[in-house]
Amino acid sequence: MDTNSQDARQKNETLTITVADADTTTTEPPVRHRWLLFKIDVFVLSFVCLQYWINYVDRIGFTNAYVSGMKNDLNLTGSQFTLAGTCFTIGYVVGMLPHNLALLVVPPRIWLSSCTLAWGLLTLGMSHAHSARDLCVLRFFQALFESCTFSGTHLILGAWYCPRELPLRSAIFTSSGLVGAIFSGFMQTAIAHELEGAGGMAGWRWLFIIDFCITVPVALYGLLCFPGMPDATSTGKFTLARHVFSKAELQYARRRLPPQEANSKLSWSVAPRVLRRWHIWVFSLAWILGGENLALASTSTFAIWLQNQDYSLSARNNYPAGIYAVGIVSTLASALYLSRVQRARHWHIAVVLAAVMTIVSALIWWRPLDPNVIFTSQYLGGIAYAGQAVFFAWANVVCHADLPERAIVLASMNMCSGAVNAWWIILFFDASTVPYFRKGCYALLATAIGSAIISIIIRILQIRESKNIANQLSTQISNDSSDDELEGHSDDEITYEIAYQDEHPNRYTKSILKSH
């Protein structure tokens, strides 16, 4: 920007009128923005990251146990392992929407902490499993409680963070789960060396016991320190949050976010309101495809391939950590791109992920027995984990004006993906198809291409919706504003100012420059 432009800005006064409250005068809130954001990160982000971390430690522990002795001890077949995974997916699907709706009614610190303790107890029960039937039952109920974590957290993050802050926090959150996956693999390796046979139990049983011992403190931390949503429940009795966040800070935390619609309450009108909009249908389809791009990694095909090729126990547990490491790097890189690059858009990342997963499917189909090719393709496939933060942050931004809709859309995305995944892994990624995974390669190719197409469609619909709302708000502001305020400014200028914020479709303001 040249000197003349800077001088011109200094000579002008910007008058901003928000549609939610056009008569409100702008005053500096009695809180420090950066200090509040720091406290939100410390108390909100820390708990959801710890919860998702232990969630993945418990979840991936099942696969690590399977390749570390559980398969032989319980006489399991590849199909039984896949069936247990399907039972987990069914439980995950059943629980998601009820959890998100419950978070609108029950204080999140109580609900999420209770669910964390419940799945910890079920993880402890895994250490006493003696048959495939035991595993299927425990995995179902374990998933039923675990399903509160992912979409529920995205709902909560969207209640605390602005659109420009959301991508990075979503990325940190999803990366914490991948860190848990890495941790679980190395922990199983250590347990196999140190605790195998201790107390007359196999090492894989000790893994579940130790997982439980780690889960309980996380649940207690959430109950005591997690503030939940920025409302009255944040200052409930017996919580540290009531001493950390003042009422003024909670009020400012709500006010700094895009305004919500007046009818955005949980009522019988929610269902027709949500179903007539495109958000739930298109975003759910998007994550069905994006979630199945993850099937290559989430079904532990690499660990099963390593076992099939007679790699050592430590290799089966440690080598897959590279996939999660790639997932962490790609997730954080995509978040930094969305947060720091001015013209960055969510669909840019989605198309890149689709292109990479197309290459991955081709590599595995081409040389399924070549270690160099398989290691490269499996690690490269870890980039699909970035889709978690991208698509859910995108839905959070688009649906922010309607809290119940946002809760339903986020749950529906994960729920629909899980519903498809329940039979998808059996049909295309069954453990018995190792080492070729031919059907899985074709399925991955289809979902990769499909996810790119649907991402572009979402972008088109988002722009169209932004323009429609911008036109409506432009007319409303013109009617509500005085003639003096609008003097010398055309409708096109006002409309452009509003429509330009298409990545933040619920933050519509009109800025008018008035000369002194």
Image (cartoon, grey):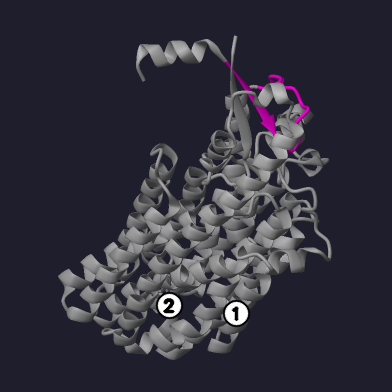
The quarter of the picture where residue 395 lies is bottom right
Q: Position of residue 209 (x, y in %)?
A: 55, 65
Local secondary structure at mark 1: helix
- Amino acid type for the residue under numbered disc 1: Ile
Q: Is residue 122 visible?
A: yes
| Extent of the magenta region | 13-31
Give the CA separation, mark 2 to mark 1: 20 Å
Q: Nearer the viewer, mark 2 or mark 1?
A: 1
Q: Residue at x 53, y 46 (%)?
A: 502
Specify few, some or many for label 1: CA neighbours under 10 Å numbering under 14, 14-19, or 20 or more: many
Looking at the rendered structure, the kind of residue marked 2 is Tyr
Q: Is residue 343 magenta?
A: no
Q: Nearer the viewer, residue 397 or 225?
A: 397
Please name whichever residue, 137 or 28, is drawn nearer the observer in this view of the structure. Answer: 28
Q: Which mark is residue 223?
A: none
- The N terminus lies in which quarter of the figure? top left
Looking at the image, residue 333 sits to the left or right of residue 81; the answer is left
Which residue is drawn at the image coordinates 58% and 35% (left, top)? 494
Contact check, label 2 and label 1, Cβ < 8 Å: no
Asked if residue 15 is among those painted magenta in the image, a careful observer would answer yes
Image coordinates for residue 389, horizontal then vertical, percent: 48, 54
Q: Quadrant of the C terminus?
A: top right
Vertical relation: 337 (above or below) 423: above
Spot occupied by residue 140 in the image (x, y as percentages of width and height): 62, 78
Label 2 environment density (alpha carbons within 10 Å; few <14, some 14–19, many ≥20): some
The label on residue 90 is: 1
- Which label is found at residue 66? 2
Q: Secondary structure at mark 2?
A: helix
124 is higher (above) or lower (below) than 170: below
